[in-house]
Image (cartoon, grey):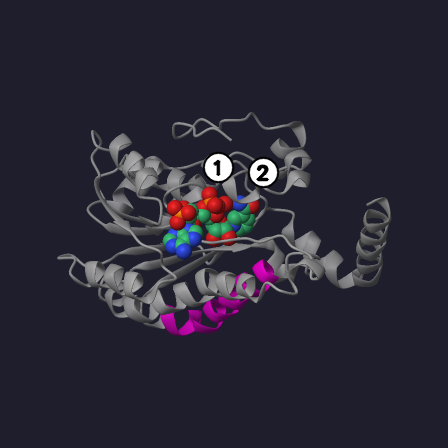
Amino acid sequence: MPRSPFGQPSQPYTFAERLLFPRTRLHSGRLAEELYGKTVLITGASSGIGEQMAYLLGELPVHLILVARRTDRLLAVQQRLEDGPATVTVVTADLRAPDELDRLVDVLLALPRGLDVFISNAGLSINRTLAASLDRFHDFERTMAINYFVPVRLLLALVPLLQQNQGQIINMSTINARLLPMPDWAAYQASKTAFDSWLRSSSAELRQSGISVTTFYLPLVRTEMIRPTAAYDRMPAMCPVEAAKQIARSLYTKRKTWHPWWLPAGELASVLFRRPIEHGLERRRRTRDADR
Ligand SMILES: NC(=O)c1ccc[n+]([C@@H]2O[C@H](COP(=O)([O-])OP(=O)(O)OC[C@H]3O[C@@H](n4cnc5c(N)ncnc54)[C@H](OP(=O)(O)O)[C@@H]3O)[C@@H](O)[C@H]2O)c1
């Protein structure tokens, strides 16, 4: 999907998408008031939701710290923001590499005004059958590394900083953490659910120490992440610009969770119709294998 300037989805919504993902109303005055002069860390800012988040917040007088592996993409984001009111610091790091993660933590610990918001967004998804994974233990290691161990390691280092500024943690989780597990997504789902559980378990303590915690249970979002899965081309997906607007809204509402309006119905169906759904998924797999 081509990159779009902030506020303009690069692909118009279909009728189904308009129903499933109603437009977000963002109160730009409240956002500006809340964020004035603050420092925001966005991991995974080189594409997708993180990149759109950078464009949105880059319209405000904030300090953005943008992290990812692709330097060229991060620099392109920085360049687009250079005439705006935000100060942008780019940190190129493969967060799975302990020394690169430590280097990022050093940058953050040296910030003169500390850290106010941590948007934990960097992530990796893998769609692969178990049969195709038998010699690929590293898939499970690399998804656990970026989707679970990286945010845990970062937060262990950043909690004192966020506590000092009564800051906010925003986590990009997935609706699948609350629904029946989907076949072929074991590595991704297990790792995203692991961090979701970790954060839910730690939230009361974090809130008690003055840190707000917001979890986004995102539906399918049309980014680079879903591009390799051809079946998703025809499925309704949220636009990353809208996802960024919802995240920005949570910066002043401090809501505990966000999910699409229809997720509770999906959760109920996961409980009430568990067996027929599982049978349906197994039948679909058998048909697919027979067609090959
Ligand atoms: N798209 C969806 O349907 C969907 C649904 C639910 C939840 N989410 C979650 O939303 C978040 C953002 O995903 P997206 O859809 O915007 O996908 P994306 O465009 O692929 O963005 C992923 C970001 O993570 C960064 N990243 C990946 N591995 C990294 C590493 N080892 N070190 C540093 N940065 C790394 C990538 O940058 P580099 O490659 O440059 O390092 C990229 O900026 C993810 O946590 C994802 O799980 C997405």
User: Residue placed at 28% from the left, 40% from the top?
Assistant: 32
The answer to whether 17 appears left or right of 241 in the picture is right
Residue 223: percent from the left, percent from the top? 51, 39
Residue 248: percent from the left, percent from the top? 39, 44
Residue receiving disc 2: 21
Mark on residue 242? 1
Q: Secondary structure at mark 1?
A: helix
Residue count near mark 1 (Cα–Cα under 10 Å), binned few <14, some 14–19, many ≥20: many
Q: How many numbered marks does the figure carry? A: 2
Q: Secondary structure at mark 2?
A: loop
Residue type at tag 2? Phe
Highlighted magenta segment, given as a residue range: 187-207
Residue count near mark 2 (Cα–Cα under 10 Å), binned few <14, some 14–19, many ≥20: some
User: Residue placed at 57% from the left, 39% from the top?
Assistant: 227
Label 2 to label 1, Cα distance in Å? Answer: 8 Å
The residue closer to the viewer here, 146 or 52, is 146
Residue 56: percent from the left, percent from the top? 35, 37
The answer to whether 167 appears left or right of 229 in the picture is left
The answer to whether 154 appears left or right of 275 in the picture is left
Callout 2–callout 1 Cβ contact below 8 Å? yes
Q: Main secondary structure of the magenta part?
A: helix
